[in-house]
Image (tube, rainbow, N blue to C red):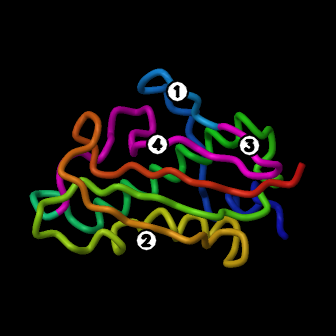
């Protein structure tokens, strides 16, 4: 596997600071041997420019994809802090994404592709393409457009 940080540098991808917790929980938990679970992250990168609103009602698919991309950046920032080295990630196992959307909006998988593409670009197809669910919901914390959580396998 190639160096994750070199891949990010070549693609101009910069990790934000880990996001502040939005409640009483652990952002990252290691369990069951080499599995790591990451609590859901929203799309605010800490600069106040979060993607807000509903898909199908004022938020475009492209804006939703940017929201999903930002969610994954936040997850990676949390993982970098907890693991100390993103090269320890063997593979992403499962991604669960929530998309704030109207009842008639049905393109949640297309929105979440924004986050999946980032993992693919950084980690490659073997490690960066997990099983995935993209769920539409009627609201998300603070009115954000997307929230994503992941389960991954690491090298100890």
User: How far is the residue under mark 1 from the one under mark 2?
Assistant: 27 Å
Q: Mark 3 — residue?
A: 31
Check disc 4 and report the residue beneath it.
Answer: 41
Residue at screen point 46% across, 58% down: 96
Q: Nearer the N terminus, badge 1 or badge 3?
A: 1
Mark toward the viewer: 4 or 3: 3
Report the magenta residues as a range: 29-55
Q: Is disc 4 surrounded by few (<14), some (14 to 19) or many (20+) residues within 10 Å?
A: many
Query: In x, y percent, where is residue 23?
Result: 43, 23
Residue shown at 26%/74% (left/top)?
A: 107
* Front residue of this view, candidates 93 and 72: 93
Sooner in the amino-acid sequence: mark 1 or mark 2: 1
Which residue is depicted at the point 29% across and 67% down? 62
Disc 4 to disc 2, C-alpha distance: 16 Å
Numbered label attached to residue 113: 2
- What's the distance in space between the residues labelled 4 and 3, CA to CA? 19 Å
The label number, if any, that marks residue 25 in the structure image: 1
Q: Are marks 1 and 3 in contact (CB under 8 Å)?
A: no
Of 102 and 87, the residue lying toward us: 102
């Amino acid at each position: 596997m190639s160096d994750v940080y070199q891949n990010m540098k070549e693609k101009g991808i910069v990790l934000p600071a880990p996001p502040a917790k939005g409640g009483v929980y652990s952002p990252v938990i290691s369990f069951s041997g080499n599995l790591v679970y990451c609590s859901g992250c929203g799309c605010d990168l800490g600069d106040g420019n979060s993607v807000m609103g509903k898909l199908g009602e004022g938020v475009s698919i492209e804006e939703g994809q940017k929201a999903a991309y930002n969610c994954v950046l936040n997850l990676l920032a949390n993982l970098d802090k907890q693991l100390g080295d993103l090269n320890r990630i063997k593979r992403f196992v499962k991604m669960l994404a929530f998309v704030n959307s109207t009842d008639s909006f049905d393109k949640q998988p297309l929105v979440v592709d924004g986050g999946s593409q980032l993992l693919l670009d950084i980690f490659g197809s073997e490690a960066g393409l997990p099983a995935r669910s993209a769920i539409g919901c009627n609201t998300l914390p603070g009115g954000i457009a997307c929230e994503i959580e992941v389960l991954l396998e690491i090298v100890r």
